[in-house]
Amino acid sequence: MGGGSRKLAPLGARTRPLAGGVWRVAPLQGEMTQSFLSRVAARYGVGLRDLLAAIAEVGGLSNIVGQTRLDSEVYLNRQARDRVSQLCRVPERHLRRALPAWVQEEPRNRFASGPAAQFHHTAEKVVPWGPACPECAARSAGRVEGARLYLEPQQRVCALHRRWLMQAPGTAGRVVRLPAGGEQWVQAQRGHARLLRRSSVGVEAFEVAAAVTASWWWQAWSREHLWPSRLRSLGSGGDGS
């Protein structure tokens, strides 16, 4: 995370200049709320947990439930959302349009009133996501920053920059540079999108394909050569994340 980590004072009357926002940080379309807040925190040179402690502060105490993880999502109540809007200098209605989970769920409160935040990381609460294409994110944000987006299966390949945007539990995801001949991945994505337009059953095709290729990877099927070689080529082309 950019900048050194330091404590951020509560966003109250004593920190009015900070409460009004020094930096404008705009969300990416479809971005996860935790990803957006991590980018806001980085802009102010603090950690995510420190930022949330200031946002969800009630009488000097932190009104946060749950633990932050690389693959978690955070939900805010109205008062916390208002504070974020002030801090990032983006109108709340714009945040609501860009961030799918912005008003998805009200968090549990440790206290009866005041701004609150809650982390979730289970599949029941957090729908499929993936890392943003670094080049696309940099163009949108105006600076190089890691970000996570909610992604459907047909959105997991950036055809322009030849990136495979992979969700990996327990991590912030992985961006894989497609190897030479990566056009076959792009064509497969386009074929899947066409299938989805014809029938919603096509959603299962991605899940079945993922399960089959995972079994080839872990079980090392002796009679299958093409897909293991493709998986190995992808494994050597990762950009990290």
Image (cartoon, helix red, strand yellow):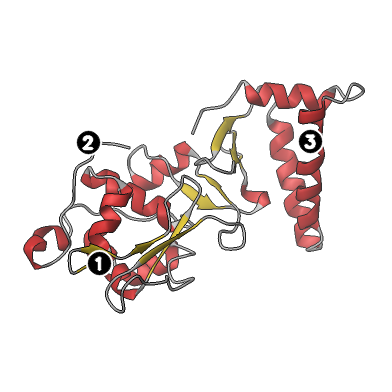
Q: Amino acid at mark 3?
A: Thr
Cα–Cα span, label 3 and label 2: 41 Å
Q: Amino acid at mark 1?
A: Arg
* Screen quadrant of the N terminus: top left
Q: Is residue 125 above or below residue 7?
A: below
Q: Nearer the viewer, residue 84 or 10?
A: 10
Q: Which residue position holds label 1? A: 83
Q: Is residue 96 above or below residue 192?
A: below
Residue 181, image x, y percentages: 70, 25
Q: Residue at x 76, y 61 (%)?
A: 197
Q: Which mark is residue 4?
A: 2
- How many marks overall? 3
In the drawing, does residue 7 fall left or right of residue 225?
left
Q: Nearer the viewer, residue 132 or 44?
A: 44
Of the two numbered discs 3 and 1 on the same chain, state the one appearing first in sequence. 1
Q: Which residue position holds label 3? A: 213
Cα–Cα span, label 3 and label 1: 45 Å
Residue 152, image x, y percentages: 63, 54
Cα–Cα span, label 1 and label 2: 23 Å
Q: Residues within 10 Å of mark 3 (few under 14, many from 20)?
A: some
In the drawing, does residue 58 fall left or right of residue 184?
left
Of the two numbered discs 1 and 2 on the same chain, state the one appearing first in sequence. 2
Mark 3 in CB contact with mark 1 (< 8 angstroms) = no
Residue 5, image x, y percentages: 23, 40
Q: Residue at x 82, y 24 (%)?
A: 220
Q: Residue at x 48, y 65 (%)?
A: 101
In the drawing, does residue 173 fall left or right of residue 153?
left
Q: Residue furthest bottom?
A: 112
Residue 39, image x, y percentages: 33, 47
Q: Amino acid at mark 2?
A: Gly
Mark 1 in CB contact with mark 2 (< 8 angstroms) = no
